[in-house]
Image (tube, rainbow, N blue to C red):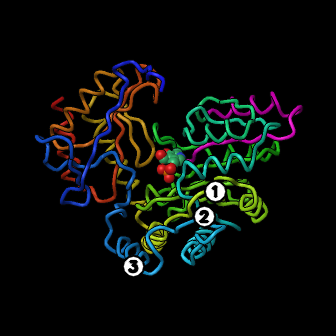
Amino acid sequence: MNKIRIPKNRIRKLKTFTLGQKPYELQNFNSAKTKNNLIDLCSNDYLGLSRDKEVIKASYEISLSEGLGSGSSRFITGSRPIHKLLETQLAEWLNQEKVLLFPSGFQANIAAVQALANRNSIVITDKLIHNSLLVGVKASGSKLIRFEHNNLKDLENKILQFNSTQKSILIIIESLYSMEGSIAPLKEITGICKKYNVQLLVDEAHALGVLGPEGKGLSFDFADEITMLTGTFGKSFGSGGAFIACNSKIGEYLIQTSGAFRYTTALSPALAAGALKSLQKIKNNKEWGINLLIASKKWKKEILRNLSFPVKGESQILSIIVGQEEKALLLQKHLEENGFLAIAIRPPTVPLNKSRIRLTIRRDLNLDILKNFISVLKSF
Ligand SMILES: Cc1ncc(COP(=O)(O)O)c(C=O)c1O
């Protein structure tokens, strides 16, 4: 194997965590001295559903009747009634003709791009889209062009550059960006896509369950203008696995042609049942997303009021922009020593001197936790 050529300060260590007592607590499993509970400010379990008793029960019960794993791909013996049920209910909830399940969001994104682009296509993506979508572009053989983050003028210029010569153009965005916590201007972007008659793929990974009407994501209101959307069950849904939502024609195309759909073991019934229970809970608790956004605003306001660092983010994802990599690591350490788990995000994930502490606000955090967090930040 080739020697890994990564600068020493960029080598990441895998850390292991186990659950703490409270629903929002984790424990560092590696370190003997920090067996104390840490408040989770960095997972994507925004609604706390990964530890919800009803979700876990649904997952356990179906494992007894349908098996823990599905045993093969959807085309062999892997399809279970729970897959169909989840696909139908999600399609109905999102007002989409077709939903197809995938074992992970990474895989769903590769499949999504491959279904909409090929080597004759131009794919124009926001500069901050997730790695899985870029892998999808590469796998599709299409030409990749990137526009400045959320910059409509730049997007339009890039489309104009290729529109007259190219048969097929695909735009790819996320609705809520995972590192900046920024929100895509969906209304304007769908308008531009309509104007130039180009396809649009939206990754709703971080928005689903929180943003948009009743947590249905930000593309819900523009469903007619969007070619395809992807979502994962690994974040707000507290489970694992993912899906693509689209019209019936593209859905059938995916079933018949997508390697990422056909040649993989079907989503485990346990994860599908957990995701379905989470969907039911999200539907029954329409205020969850709104309340989380209100709480996140309060966190942002309090951090800004008490700290000189800029804070970015328009949702449950907030970024304290620290600047230097070393300083961000020091702040991460300081927080951890004082009971908070929040991860420093450094280059190459973010640009040089834009290192940050990424915070994810959970539905189950209370005001005392916020107060404590602010005093720990102030003592840095
Ligand atoms: C924006 C985005 N898309 C897709 C994925 C992949 O989803 P999954 O974790 O289900 O593979 C992630 C998760 O890291 C993500 O942040």
Q: Which mark is residue 274?
A: none
Q: Which mark is residue 263?
A: 1
Which numbered disc, 1 or 3, marks the residue that appears first in the sequence?
3
Proximity of marks 2 and 1: CB atoms separated by less than 8 Å:
yes
- Position of residue 85 measured from the top left corner of the image (x, y, whole percent): 57, 76
Question: What residue is rendered at 42% in x and 21% in y?
Answer: 6
Left or right of 109 in this view: 250: right
Q: Nearer the viewer, mark 2 or mark 3?
A: 2
Left or right of 198 in this view: 359: left
In the image, farthest residue toward the front: 1
The C terminus - image quarter: top left
- Position of residue 267 measured from the top left corner of the image (x, y, whole percent): 53, 64
Proximity of marks 2 and 3: CB atoms separated by less than 8 Å:
no
Residue type, numbered disc 2? Ser
Q: Which residue is mark 3?
A: 61
Q: Is residue 176 visible?
A: no
Q: Nearer the viewer, mark 1 or mark 3?
A: 1
- Position of residue 16 measured from the top left corner of the image (x, y, whole percent): 27, 45
Q: Residues within 10 Å of mark 3 (few under 14, many from 20)?
A: some
- Position of residue 245 measured from the top left corner of the image (x, y, whole percent): 65, 60
- Residue labelled 1 has its Cβ within 8 Å of some atom of ligand 1: no
Question: What residue is rendered at 40% in x and 61% in y?
Answer: 238
Q: Which residues are magenta?
A: 151-176
Element on which disc 3 rests:
helix
Q: Which residue is mark 2?
A: 73
Element on which disc 1 rests:
loop
Q: Residues within 10 Å of mark 2 (few under 14, many from 20)?
A: some
Eyeballing the image, is 261 above or below 14?
below
Element on which disc 2 rests:
loop
Question: What residue is rendered at 75% in x and 35% in y?
Answer: 142
